[in-house]
Image (spheres, rainbow, N blue to C red):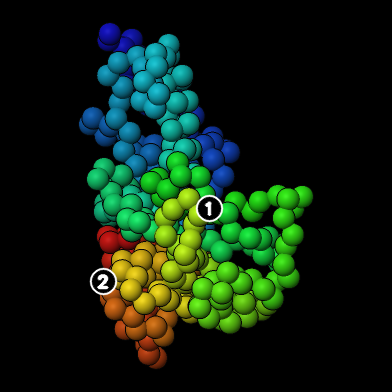
Amino acid sequence: MAIEWSRQEVLRAVRTCLLRAGAVTDGYSAVDVLAEPDSMSVIFRWRRDPNIYAIKVEFPTAPESSWTGLPVTSADEWAADVASRLAEELQTGLVRRSRRMIRDGYVVLDTHDAPDVCPAGFFIGSVPRADGVVLPPVPPPRGFRKRGYFTFGLGSPSTSVSPPASEAGYWLAKAGMDVTIPRQLIAEAKLVCWLQAHVDNARGRPFVGQAAASWEDEQHTTARLDVVHIQPGVPSEVRDALVRLAVHEAAEAGALRVLTAIDAPGLHELGFRPANGGGLALHTGSAEPPSDLTAGL
């Protein structure tokens, strides 16, 4: 069935829906919606990430939702479903799992054939904490695992007892990993992120790696990758994924660059380059050289 709305009507409806304040989801900040010959480019910022992102939205060819496939009766209804689909994509790791290319100063995101952010057989998430205390890790719902990075739920205070902050990540320590630096960063209020990797099974065990990053400056524009560790026998892809996701965490928190004194194999492939004064550095913004972060991460 042919649609009765013109492309101008569709574009106007999408712009009205996606450019309004509070549109889509928390962390999404609209920049523009531009018409292309056969599609629209939705341009936006994500959290405090210095990049400006763009995704391609095809014009409708039938009066049905591009999200659900169900019939829609107007351009406004179709645009509302575009917003709902974008919200779901962003909430399940769109920015982190997409392939990237730079065009016209934007980081264009494409999920087609994009690799999983977690290596096959493993899962990476945050070391769970809340208000200075740490909560026991809860394996994420399996439905989220193939969509992208998922932050562990914090659980319910009524059903679990929170150990003191000094015991943060005690399960990682029990698995033989050194958690001294992340705990110190928590105490100093410098922690950007603390990630953990485990085998992807119903138990969420065993734990096989960790990464932690901190703020280097009071302005929170520079982060430092302090810890990257995988257990013996764990594939190097897990280490690379830990670094990649730690960089994304830092960028989304506002870091313009990430420094590290770690010289682990694979960091150069992920975009790190020798820094002035020693160590390695990676710029997170698309306007900053090198662009390997946006090309490869």
Given the image, on which type of amino acid does mark 2 rest? Glu
Residue 125 % position (x, y): 49, 59
CA distance separating discs 2 and 1: 30 Å
Residue 278 sits above or below residue 210 on the image:
below
Question: In this image, 293 relative to 249: left or right?
Answer: left
Amino acid on which the number 1 mark rests in the picture: Pro
Report which quarter residue 187 is drawn in: bottom right
**Disc number for residue 269:** 2
- Residue at 66 percent across and 51 percent down: it is 155
Q: Nearer the viewer, residue 212 or 296?
A: 212
User: What residue occupies the far left of the structure in this picture?
Assistant: 37
How many marks do you count on the picture?
Answer: 2
Which residue is more in the foreground, 143 or 245?
Answer: 143
| Element under disc 1 | loop
For label 1, the crowd category at 10 Å Cα-Cα, with few meaning under 14, some 14 to 19 and many 20 or more, is some
Disc 2 to disc 1: CB gap under 8 Å: no
Helix, strand or loop status at disc 2: loop
Which quadrant is the C terminus positioned in?
bottom left
Q: Residue at x 39, y 91 (%)?
A: 277
Viewed as shown, does residue 176 lie left or right of 38? right
Q: Quadrant of residue 290?
A: bottom left
Numbered circle sitting on residue 197 = none
Q: Which residue is mark 1?
A: 139
Residue 171 placed where, x, y %?
58, 69
Say above or below: 58 vs 249.
Answer: above
Q: Is residue 256 visible?
A: no
Choose mark 2 or mark 1, whichever is in front. Answer: 1
Rendered view: 151 above or below 165: above
